[in-house]
Image: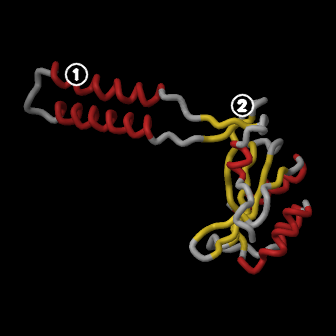
């Protein structure tokens, strides 16, 4: 196993890849949460009832919305989308028994995706098939990732699949859920 195999994300990020682009969620939701939090705290100051639970609820709700807005603004998850359809690419994993490594590499590199069902699944993730695919299966990459002591290593180069192979992989993912 070589450590220099590029991951799926590295291939997507490469300058010569025009099929996929990196996207971040809009900051509008975080701004709305922040403004709603400030509004709840401001409304609390205008409430004439001072002995009830309502002021406490408004302050706690406002502080919660402020914190949620701040966290969402700074910890947004970056994703990937197809350039021509703007469809999101979803990453999923299939775990296999570590003893099936050579068979899995042969299946993925050879394109015999229908034989994946014959491999022994595993509950632990010592050997994974990482899949990045669109919902409709028109776009799909996969890569075998193996655990060698203390780290996961890309066992092969990420491979782009035909739509037929992608459908077979997506069907397998649906069965395993």
The residue pinned by badge 1 equals 43
Q: Please state the horizontal and vertical placement of residue 157, each as a whole percent of the image.
A: 79, 58
Mark 1 crowdedness (10 Å alpha carbons): few <14, some 14-19, many ≥20: some
Q: Nearer the viewer, mark 2 or mark 1?
A: 2
The residue pinned by badge 2 equals 86
| C-alpha distance separating marks 2 and 1 | 40 Å
- In the visual, does 85 lie left or right of 107? left
Sequence-earlier tag: 2 or 1: 1
Depicted 24 relative to depicted 4: above or below = above
- In the visual, does 72 lie left or right of 105? left
At 27% from the left edge and 26% from the top edge, which residue is drawn? Answer: 40
Q: Are marks 2 and 1 in contact (CB under 8 Å)?
A: no
At 69% from the left edge and 70% from the top edge, which residue is drawn? Answer: 146
- In the visual, does 111 lie left or right of 52? right
**Toward which corner of the image does residue 110 lie, by quadrant?**
bottom right
* SS at badge 1: helix
Mark 2 crowdedness (10 Å alpha carbons): few <14, some 14-19, many ≥20: few
At 78% from the left edge and 77% from the top edge, which residue is drawn? Answer: 100
* SS at badge 2: loop
**Toward which corner of the image does residue 51 lie, by quadrant?**
top left
Q: Please state the horizontal and vertical placement of residue 163, each as a whole percent of the image.
A: 88, 46
Please, which residue is most extreme toward the bottom here?
A: 99
Depicted 83 relative to depicted 152: above or below = above
* Quarter that holds the N terminus: bottom right
Depicted 106 relative to depicted 82: above or below = below
Q: Please state the horizontal and vertical placement of residue 177, each as a whole percent of the image.
A: 67, 60
């Amino acid at each position: 196993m070589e450590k220099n195999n590029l991951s799926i994300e590295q291939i997507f990020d490469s300058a010569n890849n025009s099929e996929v682009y990196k996207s971040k969620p809009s900051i509008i939701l975080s701004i709305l949460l922040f403004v709603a939090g400030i509004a709840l705290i401001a409304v609390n100051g205008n409430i004439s009832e001072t002995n009830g639970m309502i002021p406490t609820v408004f302050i706690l709700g406002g502080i919660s919305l402020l914190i949620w807005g701040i966290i969402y603004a700074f910890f947004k998850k970056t994703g990937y989308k197809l350039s021509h359809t703007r469809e999101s690419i979803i990453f999923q994993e299939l775990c296999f028994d570590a003893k099936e490594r050579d068979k899995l590499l042969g299946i993925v590199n050879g394109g015999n995706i229908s034989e994946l069902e014959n491999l022994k699944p595993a509950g632990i993730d010592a050997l994974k098939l990482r899949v990045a695919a669109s919902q409709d299966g028109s776009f799909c990459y996969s890569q075998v990732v193996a655990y060698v002591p203390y780290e996961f290593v890309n066992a092969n180069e990420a491979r782009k699949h035909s739509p037929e192979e992608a459908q077979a992989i997506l069907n397998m993912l649906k069965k395993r859920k």
